């Protein structure tokens, strides 16, 4: 019985290819069989269904009325079978395989706990973590090099990418607890002009948001240095007493630093999972994101798009 079902699926695949190309020679090449074998497959399907599916002449192949009627059902059946196979393979994938994840530097604060827990639960899955600026990660996602990207919501328009909100954040001034700026509950950009700053490099998401606000307000900061990674940037803040500007979550595990929200309506940032639209979400990706949502930073603000 199982063999017959497999044969029927092969018949349907051959039929759909022939209906698409309307050329048995080209269809046979696409199915990697000889033309005589392909023609025999179509003949067997027609005999099983008790009807003719194609009009054939020496110059032309076209669908009969029965063939036109069968085509959408055949496509649906093949898609369902392929989806079933993907899901079964997906179940096995939690025991092996590779998960490719893009992460912006400013999103690093939630990764340590997530990686530790995921690797403990799924020791046979290889994790390929790529830290790059948002623009490069988006390009890799669009090229199917990454399963998903963890970042703040991008400012550009990406119609092929969907952003799923994980948590809200705000652009903030990051200083040592002994800094005069640490006394503020909220801080205006005009106050910062009197203090030296070390900023994230241009192209990073926090810097992009900041530059938009600086341009809008006409504010110029006293920038002494720029760095393209968050960890050494915070280390420099600790050693020099200068301030930087990042998302408030950058200090999640830093008891010696304080995050003061900038008093401007354009400072909202949204931590998101970026995925390609219409792409099947494999179980390993869903499980990684589930564990991510259990971290202390996002647990109370989780959205339920994965349910």
Image (cartoon, helix red, strand yellow):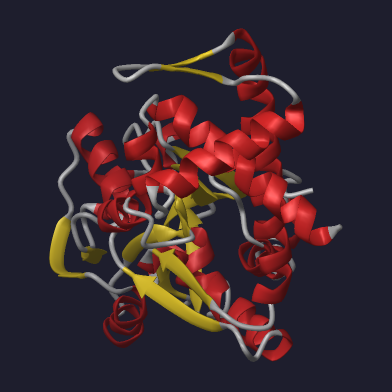
Q: 108 or 172: nearer the eye?
A: 108
**In the image as oriented, which residue stretches furthest toward the right?**
1
Whether residue 161 sits left or right of residue 133 in the image: it is right
Foreground pick, 5 / 130: 5
Out of 113 and 149, give the one closest to the viewer. 149
| Residue ID at (38%, 28%) | 21
Residue furthest to the top: 65
Rendered location of residue 266, percent (x, y)? 41, 35
Does any portion of residue 262 appear in the rendered image?
A: no
Query: 150 or 172: which is nearer to us?
Result: 150
Which corner quadrant of the image does residue 93 belong to? bottom right
In this picture, is 91 found above or below 80? below
Q: Residue at x 23, y 44 (%)?
A: 211
Say above or below: 76 vs 5.
above
Residue 170: tell me if it is visible.
yes
Task: Give the residue drawn at x 32%, y 38%.
Answer: 26
Quadrant hosting residue 242 = bottom left
Residue 145's quadrant in the figure? bottom left
Residue 129 place in picture, x, y as percent? 43, 76
**Quadrant for the N terminus in the image:** bottom right
Left or right of residue 89, residue 207 in this image? left
Horizontal side, residue 64 vs residue 245: left or right = right
Residue at (35, 71) in percent of width and height: 131
Taking 36 as reference, is 159 above or below it? above
Q: Residue 297 at x, y = what percent?
A: 65, 65
């Amino acid at each position: 019985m199982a063999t017959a079902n497999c044969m029927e699926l092969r018949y349907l695949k051959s039929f759909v290819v022939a209906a698409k190309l309307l050329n048995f020679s080209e269809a046979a090449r696409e199915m990697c069989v000889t033309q005589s074998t392909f023609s025999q497959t179509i003949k067997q399907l027609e005999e099983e269904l008790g009807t003719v599916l194609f009009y054939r002449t020496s110059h032309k192949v076209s669908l009969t009325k029965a063939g036109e009627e069968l085509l959408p059902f055949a496509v649906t059946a093949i898609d369902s079978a392929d989806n079933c196979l993907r899901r079964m393979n997906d179940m096995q994938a939690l025991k092996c395989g590779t998960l490719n994840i893009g992460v912006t530097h400013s999103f690093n604060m939630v990764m340590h706990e997530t990686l530790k827990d995921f690797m403990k639960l799924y020791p046979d899955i290889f994790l390929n973590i790529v830290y790059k600026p948002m623009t490069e990660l988006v390009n890799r996602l669009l090229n199917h090099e990454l399963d998903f990207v963890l970042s703040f919501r991008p400012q550009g328009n990406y119609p092929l990418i969907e952003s799923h909100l994980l948590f809200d954040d705000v652009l903030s001034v990051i200083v040592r607890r002994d800094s005069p700026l640490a006394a503020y509950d909220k801080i205006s950009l005009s106050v910062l002009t009197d203090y030296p700053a070390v900023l994230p490099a241009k192209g990073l998401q926090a810097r992009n948001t900041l530059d938009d606000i600086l341009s809008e307000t006409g504010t110029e900061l006293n920038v002494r240095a720029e760095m393209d990674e968050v960890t050494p940037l915070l280390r420099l803040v600790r050693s020099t007493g200068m301030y930087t500007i990042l998302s408030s979550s950058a200090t999640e595990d830093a008891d010696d630093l304080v995050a003061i929200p900038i008093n401007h309506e354009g400072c909202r940032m949204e931590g998101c999972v970026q995925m390609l639209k219409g792409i099947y979400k494999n179980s390993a990706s869903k499980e990684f994101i589930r564990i991510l949502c259990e971290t202390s930073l996002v647990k109370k603000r989780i959205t339920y798009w994965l349910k």
